[in-house]
Amino acid sequence: MQSSPPMPGLSRRQFNGLVAGAAVLGAPALRAQSGNRIVLGQSAAFTGAAAQLGIQFHAGAKLFFDQLNGQGGVSGQRIEIVQLDDGYEPDRCAENTQKLLASEVFALFGYIGTPTSLAALPLATKAQTPFIAPFTGAMGLRQPFNRLAFHLRASYNDETALIVRQLTNLGLNKVAVFHQNDAYGKAGLDGTVLALTARNLKPVATATVERNSVDVAQAVATINAAKPDAVVQISAYKSCAAYIRAARAAGYGGTFYNVSFVGTQALADELGKDGAGVVVSQVVPTPYSASRPITREFIEAIGKGGNKVQPNFSSMEGFLAAKLFSEGLRRAGSRVTRDSFINGMEAIGEQSFGGFQVSLGPNDHVASSFAELSMLTGDGKVRT
């Protein structure tokens, strides 16, 4: 890849609009890159049905960057994030992304969701701007290989394979899929079908919900009629919670499995006691047990100055994403460019981030395939 071309400057109207949008969320005012600042752009859901995912991921990332900045940053460079709210809507995300790219952000970071990330990645690619750690496991963002895109988390194929393996090991072969009617839901459905097909099975029923909607009545009727042993859910926490309550109220007595994007703590908070027994796959280590050094590091960081950060899987993922970005930046050399940063990310190789294994190289931009299952306990807590 050739050296990145200089980004166009902001018009006064663009600049005022972007700074106003960032100021609403308490983000640092955006200025051109300087010798001691690296500015990242994040478009994510900070309002709406997926808001807790954006809020908590951002909080975890900012916690890491703030404490790193307090220690002098990386080679004297502070790392800051400008955040813009897209409400988990692709059109708003694309508009935000264009603003961020026009403002000369160094990279795009921590986008939340599949449909939004799919809207943003082509824009980042055209602008030759790195796209780092989106909160999605969709294969459509990983294939074909894109040198500008780096992923922290395992794929939805990894998560759904784990879920199907668990279900079939338990003898639960009648599996239905409730999924969001968009690219995210399709990615999760495809992964589930792939895993079932490998066992000569197929879904006994599928049904959808629209993005940012909790209108699940028809989906419940369709899936309950098939009498599945378990329902795999591929949606956001509000619609998944609505589905679980409605399905149970209609007489369903089976189990519910979710992929990590649901937002585990958000789902637990939404369901309360109704969450008991609901299973969620995870792609980062648990923040609730100090068995791994990375969890101890995370909890200690909260204790040192991140008291407003809720320790959960979403904030842990943001913390790890920031750590991964910073490691790449350290390896980028004294005069950081986008190209040298990409080279730095690819030079990470195999490492342990306090017990969380990552691996990156010139031909592999997916850092982790880690996946495990957790269960909601019904009292707002999560057991792994």
Image (spheres, rainbow, N blue to C red):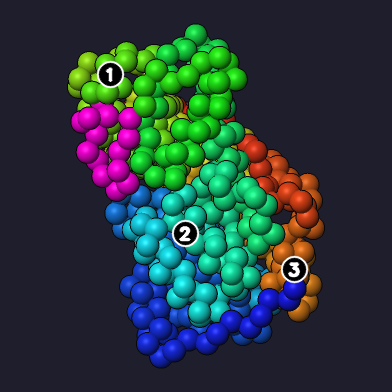
Left or right of residue 154, residue 208 in this image: left
* Element on which disc 3 rests: loop
Q: Position of residue 303 (x, y in %)?
A: 51, 54
Badge 1 local density, few (<14 within 10 Å), some, or many (20+)? many
Identify the residue shown where x is 25% and y is 26%: 220
Residue under numbered circle 3 = 1
CB contact under 8 Å: marks 3 and 2: no
**Disc 2 and disc 1: Cα gap in Å?**
34 Å
* Residue at 57% across, 30% down: 372
Residue 152 visible in this rendered orientation of the protein: no
Q: CA distance from mark 3 to mark 1?
A: 52 Å
Q: Looking at numbered disc 2 in the image, what kind of residue is underneath it?
A: Ala
The residue depicted at 45 percent of the width and 75 percent of the height is 99
Q: Position of residue 211 (x, y in %)?
A: 32, 46
The correct choice, above or below, for 378 with respect to 121 in the image is above
Residue visible at 63% across and 58% down in the picture: 149
On the image, numbered disc 2 is attached to which residue?
119
* Marks 3 and 2, the one that precedes in the sequence: 3
What secondary structure is found at the residue carrying circle 2?
A: helix
Q: What SS does tag 1 mark? A: helix
Q: Which residue is mark 1?
A: 224
Q: Which residues are magenta?
A: 207-220
